[in-house]
Amino acid sequence: MAEEPAAKPFYSVLILAFVCSALVAGAAVGLRPMQEANRQLDQKKNILYAAGLYEEGKTITELFASIEIKIVELTTGQYIPEHQLPPESYNQLKSALTESGGHPLNSEDDIARLRRIEKYSFVYLVKNGRQIEQIILPVRGKGLWSTMHAYIALDGDLTTVRGVSFYEHGETPGLGGEIENRKWQEGWRGKQLYGSAGGVNLEVVKGKAAETGNEALFQIDGLSGATLTAKGVNNLMEFWFGDHGFKPYFNQLNLKSQMDK
């Protein structure tokens, strides 16, 4: 009986590994459209949560039909026409990494530790006729371990928080990870974003938020054992609702509101 070549088992394993790799790669490619569709549904669900519009028993598509999607240029606060930049084809996070769609931030301005920021952002509007009832905005910033992603819903007055939904992060479970706890997020409702001087006064404090007085309008309960995560939340709020974020957009809305009167 002839002896098998010594290399035969090696080639058999190599062929098997190649076949398995091809199957895994093919499955990944084939599942990519489904994964993207699920990702978009999850984002829509979190937008609805932030706006207080999510209802059990109704589909995400059905509920989201009441929300108008716009794209705004951050530096000017102006809406971008759909024919120029269709919302369905725009990827905001990827755009920030490109030369044409984003730009670097200097260390002084980059309090949310993003390094780069996109030129255009999604905004989601809930309207009653022509009147804006609330605006849901995507925000993000570094916590202790990760970039935290959230949606913040504001009342039509552009300062009263309707709700928040942190939906993606890598913070420590049970500590900083409590930013995704719906009970903690409920504490944001009705809080005020801006103080009388126009700056961002809303903050996650250490310990319990004040229950009475002016401070109660701006304070959110702290996160036990997660000081750096809470600091990251405060920094991302200050960044995105300041001059490098949505403040120019709010200025445009206020200007339009004055002109319509």
Image (cartoon, rainbow, N blue to C red):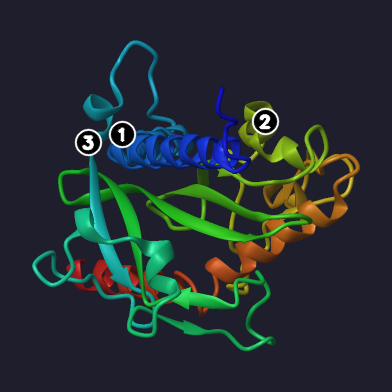
Q: Amino acid at mark 2?
A: Asn
Q: Which of these two is toward me, 226 or 25?
A: 25
Indicate left or right for 165 with 111 as reference. left
**Which percent across, then down, holds residue 165?**
54, 40
SS at mark 2 in the image: loop
SS at mark 1 in the image: helix
**Which percent across, then down, holds residue 253?**
31, 68
The label on residue 181 is: 2
Residue sitting at x 59%, y 35%: 9
Q: Residues within 10 Å of mark 1 (few under 14, many from 20)?
A: few
Q: Which of these two is toward me, 132 or 52?
A: 52
SS at mark 3 in the image: loop
Q: Quadrant of the C terminus?
A: bottom left
Question: Could you tell which of marks 3 and 2 lies nearer the N-terminus?
Answer: 3
The label on residue 66 is: 3
Residue sitting at x 74%, y 52%: 214
Q: Quadrant of the N terminus?
A: top right
